[in-house]
Image (cartoon, rainbow, N blue to C red):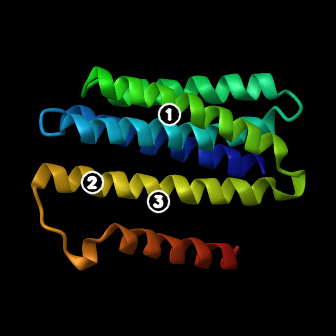
Amino acid sequence: MNALVLVVIALTFIFTLIVIIRTIHNRKRITCMAGMMIAMAMGMNVGLTIGVIFGILFSGNLFMSSLAGMLIGMGTGFVTGLPVSIMAVLDGLLSGLMGGLMGAMLGEMIAPDYHSTILKIMFFMFISIILLLFKMIHNMINNEDKHYLSHPLTLIGLFGVIFVVFEKLN
């Protein structure tokens, strides 16, 4: 369980950092609306994932897990929206606050037998949303037409198959 938590935290941090760097690097080509969407998705996504982890780790102390989840979610939303606009910052802050709260409550309510299962589900959702954000940023930067092989559902489906195969091999 502890190894799974560390892996999820590390990969969440790495992928979040990549999205933030890509947003900063391409801030001139990202519209305000897309920047708001990126900041909101990242704040909520990280808040939920980290909130669940802290809800599990600080089981019995909803205040601490909520506070930690909210602060990390809000921080992520803030930093992601900062290069784009003040509206993106506000969207990121508020969605990070909500995601951190909801994630902490979910982590607190899940029975200990299902802790690793909820972590795997949350991480799958996190990666799926990250893939969608990468695709959105890529399409916006390159002004590409949509091709059926590059459809976001194809990416999520392929990742889902890998997730199921990995789970069965484990």
CB-based contact (under 8 Å), mark 3 and mark 2: no
Residue neighbourhood size for the residue with mark 1, other residues' Cα within 10 Å, grouped as few (<14), some (14–19), many (≥20) = many
Provide the residue designation for mark 2: 136
From the viewer's perspective, is 42 left or right of 55? left
Label 2 vs 1, first from the N-terminus = 1
The residue under the point 56% across, 42% down is: 10
**Label 3 or label 2, whichever comes before in sequence order:** 3
Looking at the rendered structure, the kind of residue marked 2 is Met
Residue 73 visible from this viewpoint: no
Q: Position of residue 18 (x, y in %)?
A: 36, 42
Mark-to-mark CA distance, 1 and 3: 18 Å
What amino acid type should be assigned to the residue bearing mark 1? Ser
**Visible residue check, residue 131:** yes
- Find residue 30 and report its horizontal and vertical position in percent: 18, 39
The image quarter in which residue 106 lies = top right
Cβ–Cβ under 8 Å for marks 1 and 3: no
In this rendering, is residue 117 above or below 167?
above
Q: Amino acid at mark 3?
A: Ser
Q: Secondary structure at mark 3?
A: helix
Q: Residue at x 19, y 75 (%)?
A: 147
Residue at image x 49%, y 27%? 94
Label drawn at residue 95: 1
Q: CA distance from mark 2 to mark 1?
A: 19 Å
What residue is shown with label 3?
Answer: 128
Query: Considering the numbered disc 2 on the image, is that residue within a helix, a strand or a loop?
Result: helix
- Location of residue 99 in the rendering, given as x and y in whole percent from the top left corner: 58, 37
